[in-house]
Amino acid sequence: MQSPQRRWADAALIAPLAVLLLGPLAVAANRLWAVGGVDPATAALDLSPAGWRSAWSSIQLAFLASIGVVLLGTPVAFALAKQPARRRRWMTTAVALPFVTPSIVAAVAFLALMDVSGPIGSTLRTASATTLLGPGSIALLVAMVWFNLSLVTRMLTPALARTDPAYLEQLRLLPQGNSAWLRFRAWWWPVLGPALGAAAGLTFTFAFTSFAVVRWLAPEATTIELLLAEQGSGAGIPGYRTGLSRLVLGTAVVQGLALLVAAVVVNAMQRHHGARMLQTTTLHNGDAPASRQSTALAMSAVVFALTPLLAVLAASVRVRTPSGHRFGLDGWRRALSGDAGGTGLVDAFATSVGTAVWTVAIAMPVGWWCASAVLSAERADHRRRAQAIDLLAMAPLVVSSAMVGLGSLLGLLRFAPNLIASPVLLPMAHATLVLPVVVRVLLPAMRALPDDLEEQAATLGLGPWHRWSLVRLPMLRPAAVVAAGLALAFSLGEFGASWILVRSTGSTTLAVLVDAWLARPGFDATTRPAAMAVASVLGLLAAGVMLGVERWRDDRIGGGL
Amino acid sequence: MPGLRVEGLRVAFGEMSVLDGLDLTVAPGERVAVLGPSGCGKSTLLRTIAGLQAPVNGLVLLDDDDVTDRPPEHRGIGLLFQRPVLYPHRDVAGNLALGLPRGLKRDERKRRIASALVEVGLEGFEARDVTTLSGGEGQRVALARALLAEPRALLLDEPFSALDGTLRRRLVETTAAVLQERSLPAVHVTHDPDEAEAFADRVFHMEGGRLTQRL
Amino acid sequence: MKAPAMLMVLLLAGTTLSGCLGEDLLPVEDCSTFVADTRSDDGVLRVLTYDIASLTPEFLEAFRNETGIEVELVRTGDAGAVLEQVLLYDGAPQVDLVLGLDGSYLPIAVARCLISEHGVSLAGVQTSILDASGDIGAHGVPFDHGWVCLNADSGAIDTMPTSLWNLTEPAYEGRVALPSPLSSSPGRAFFLATLEGLGDEAWTWWEAMLANDAIVTSGWSEAYEIHYSGGYGVWGEGHIGDAAVTVSYCHSPGVEAYYGGNATTSVPLALPGGVYHQIEYGAVLTGAANASAAEAFLAHLVSPEANAEMPYQNLMYSVLEGADLPEEEGYRHHSLVPTEAASTLGGMDVVALDLALDALALLLEA
């Protein structure tokens, strides 16, 4: 049974959190409803052809991306698992680098990659994966897979690497395991299936809501997220383009439902996965040397992960001339000076870093509190309450950055217009978006701590504050560092919500600045390299944070992130 | 000639020779123990016979059938590991089911699983979660499973070494009795001489990659 | 599994209930009764604009030296986004001044009483521009202008089209790239030109263009950089190049030449019904905290030193008397000044414009 204080403390968290997360959305929905004259359910069911097209595009993209990630990620995870321990660690880190890369940097990276690869690049830019997604969608799918590959490797590789080979050897000697297919049914599928399901579900969510990459790689594709971000700010204005208000409301509802389904699936899979895999792993490290094929595959994955990022750097010094290209620092100079009305690189850097620090300052305590609340509810066997808090913390995953941005814009402007220019707005939006990540990393670590640890400390005479600071905190420090690092990296690279909100303020973040440079008419050949220069800085920053945090990460930190 | 026969088995890891022209014959129903300190190659011997390790030279024959080049899936040899290799995502019945041949009807499956559990003294354990079993119970499940597969020979890689005194002795006796009934050739490796005596008809020493019979 | 259901119910309930609380959100009819919500003046001038390049640090520095006023720029995406922001502020503006609304956007804000009349002297501005501005001139200060028209790739077409209707013929099937009037400012300008120039036949023309596989893009850059074969887009970077004709400015070929070493295959096409005189305005918002500073800024913007920079920084014409495009690198040579053009709202009012855009949206979706 939880103490009354605990329950009041939890209530003190839940109520404002729910208001903070869901409030702006509810207000925005209300406004769209009032302006469009149609309630959310009808808006979703009665979607215009443009709305249906955008919904279909999102679904196609997300579906294909999930399949791609699972198909490519599984062999890579296996190949990585077979590598010797030290090599495996840095390879896994390299393959995970794309995940923390800001989406706008990824978009620019693939643009750069295709620019420098001549005819192959041009064909990729114009090839379509499906007619709905249009030209560039093959490049888009490759980018999606690139982005999310580490979801599979992070979930599978540690477990695969430490699985006692005896499990498979024993199975080979039994009638129900004497063929590869039987072993797949008896072992691989039950053990890996949930993990792959979770990875696929998360990829679905990220691909469904991706903005920067779709915007720049497949310009003819209109997904729901694109529609919400690019056209959303024209909605909610009485007597002005009311059709748009209905469209935004309807597609937002459709997106929310799709993401809710995905989140529920991921949640179920992760509970499944965490429980089972944890029990089968031992501290066994594979001693058979890796085959040449595995090493080749693993190395290819590393090269695949790193090349686009290097291409950004290369493109930042590549300036177009009437006769071809030349090497030059013009792009960097323009980016730094921010001439012709744009923000300078340094100002944007300061804004990004400041916002990120505030985001971590908000998200970490809230996330920690959430995770603790879920855990204590679970331990006291209040399963439903635990699930409710867990889902609440996951809500932003269901809600996409464009929706958060639009929600803040339409929801807050109504009540506090001066807040729109406040420096606290962007960190709040980022913290909302980053919260699920923090909870997802902290919760498994908290779960893995033995319960009697604190009881033992109590018997040694340590009071509650000391128990927390001397026992619990140090043991959770690795997970906390990773969570903070991820929060920092994601805030630095956040694009969707920032793109919508920053338009009302005088400053801009690095991510939005890249987009601004790309959006300039390209008559002047230095705008493209300038965009690449800003993207390089942003990418290096995010990578730096992640690598710095990597020291603290060990295989116990799960959640696939 | 029925039973298990190993002739001139030679296994090497790189430069290091582990088994050096080893011979062994085990008649059906005969139980044989191999004694030796840790690391002398006892496990390697069993793994080679089972097919998990490829020999440089030599033959493995089962009932005059040359299985040396056959993969472990198709040799029909059972192996008990040092710790019970039970699959945590399946319950006891599910684990035992892995030992059953394909194509059995559900009733037949349940019947065989139930009788196997009775045989090892775990009646009624079908629905138990394998992670809640004790070491002894786990090995008994592993044994029952190995026997359900109706192997032509059974190899035991110190399966009882992690258990304590009374329990171990009881398990050794149970296993010996069960094997007695089925006239299977069995090879048990251990480092405990008493255990070897209690279990086997003949006891061998492993030295220099070969076996010498203990008297 | 109950929790997700609970969450959904909560969300739906929240929105259901809150729908009842909506106030009357319709715009005000009579501007004299409009009440603005002015925030306090902190001495900083806030300017809302899209990415207008001519607001260089030097310009802002010069302004500060002359008047002592600090300027803060708030940048949105394009003219449409600027308008939306003004409409969202709805009389409680967080900025003082808005730059970049042209004659098709500004009237909408004026109709909602969101723009106050200015007192800036327009002495140096060309009379033709003042005439073209009409009533809007009292609310907006013009600071640059240009003509939106079609551009064609002379290298891809043998005989140039002489009428808009040529573009609906088989020879131009799938070869015309049109930025959507719903999401692009030049696209919208072109749309207004066709409505005024083709009259009742305008809708027939648009239907015919769609039937002729016209490529409709979301923005100008997509049409110009990716589809148009006559512009700088041909130099790699995802170029498809399937359009020989697109919508841009009559002086875009001049810009091409200026940056491309006095050489370009792009040619301006001023077809009847396909030219729009786009004048961009600066305007002071109703309820602005620092209206006087805003007016000083606007006066500075139309001063000879600042306005002469327009062709270089902003790639548009200066509004001042006697100004023209520079002659360097064929900037002026490759550009065209059309003799007739549609302007402001193409003869409609804001309500009719909104309806026309909605009708076009339906047409494009079908």
Image (cartoon, rainbow, N blue to C red):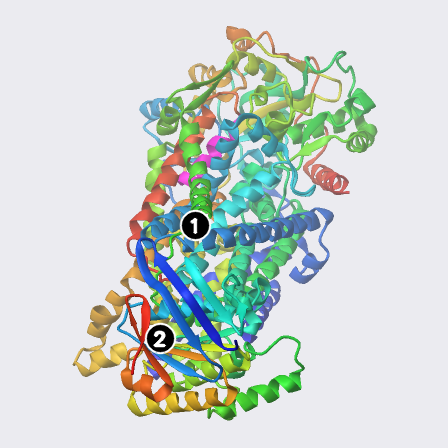
Taking the image as shown, residue A358 lies to the left or right of residue A37, namely: left
Question: Where does label 1 land, which residue?
Answer: A291
Magenta: main secondary structure: helix
Q: Secondary structure at mark 1?
A: loop
Q: Position of residue A360 (x, y in %)?
A: 34, 55
Dot 1: chain letter: A
Classify C288 as above or below A265: above
Residue under the image location 61 percent in, 89 percent down: B111
Residue C296: name its quadrant: top left
Amino acid found under the numbered disc labelled 2: Ala
Of the residues tagged 1 and 2, which is closer to the observer? Answer: 1
Instruction: Estimate how packed mark 1 is, as few (under 14), some (14 to 19) or many (20 or more) residues with alpha carbons within 10 Å.
Output: few
Viewer-closest of A117 and A477: A117
User: Can residue C33 be seen?
Assistant: no
Work out how far the residue at label 1 is from the one at label 2, CA to CA, in angstroms. Answer: 55 Å
Q: Secondary structure at mark 2?
A: helix
Amino acid found under the numbered disc labelled 1: Ser
Q: Position of residue A68 (x, y in %)?
A: 57, 50
Tell me which segment is drawn in magenta: A508-521
Classify A204 as above or below A337: below
Classify A247 as above or below A539: below
Q: Position of residue A471 (x, y in %)?
A: 23, 71
